[in-house]
Image (spheres, helix red, strand yellow):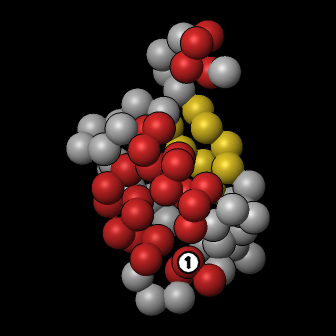
């Protein structure tokens, strides 16, 4: 069984992950590239720095090939 943590933006996502033992139990991070309150690129860089071995899936509703690469 897996639990899912949800957050309305990148800032809240980081706060949620840092609560309790959540950061020790991460198996996968799925995030958007464009989010309010914190740039998606900044959040992705933070995830890579803090949890480099955790797979990261990035989704977006805004087609931008430059951003995708």
Q: Is residue 60 left or right of residue 7?
A: right
Residue 52 horizontal/vertical position (percent): 69, 62
Residue 16 horizontal/vertical position (percent): 39, 70
The residue sitting at 74% across, 55% down in the picture is: 55
Q: Quadrant of residue 53?
A: bottom right
Q: Residues within 10 Å of mark 1 (few under 14, many from 20)?
A: some
Residue 24 horizontal/vertical position (percent): 62, 83
Which quadrant is the C terminus positioned in? Answer: top right
Q: Quadrant of residue 7?
A: bottom left
Q: Quadrant of residue 49?
A: bottom right
Residue 30 horizontal/vertical position (percent): 60, 49
The residue sitting at 74% across, 76% down in the picture is: 1
42 over 51 or under it: above or below:
above
Q: Residue furthest left?
A: 37
Judge by depth and name the residue closer to the eye, 40 or 1: 40
Q: Residue furthest bottom?
A: 20
Q: Residue furthest front?
A: 49
The residue sitting at 42% across, 44% down in the picture is: 42
16 over 43 or under it: above or below:
below
Secondary structure under badge 1?
A: helix
Residue 63 shows in this picture = no
Q: Which residue is mark 1?
A: 23
Residue 33 shows in this picture = yes
Q: Is residue 14 left or right of residue 25?
A: left
Q: Is residue 51 left or right of residue 37?
A: right
């Amino acid at each position: 069984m897996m639990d899912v943590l949800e957050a309305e933006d990148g800032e809240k996502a980081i706060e949620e992950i840092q609560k309790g033992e959540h950061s020790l139990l991460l198996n996968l991070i799925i995030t958007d590239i464009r989010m309010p309150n914190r740039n998606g690129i900044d959040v992705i860089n933070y995830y890579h720095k803090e949890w480099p071995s955790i797979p990261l899936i990035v989704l977006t509703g805004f087609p931008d090939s430059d951003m995708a690469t």
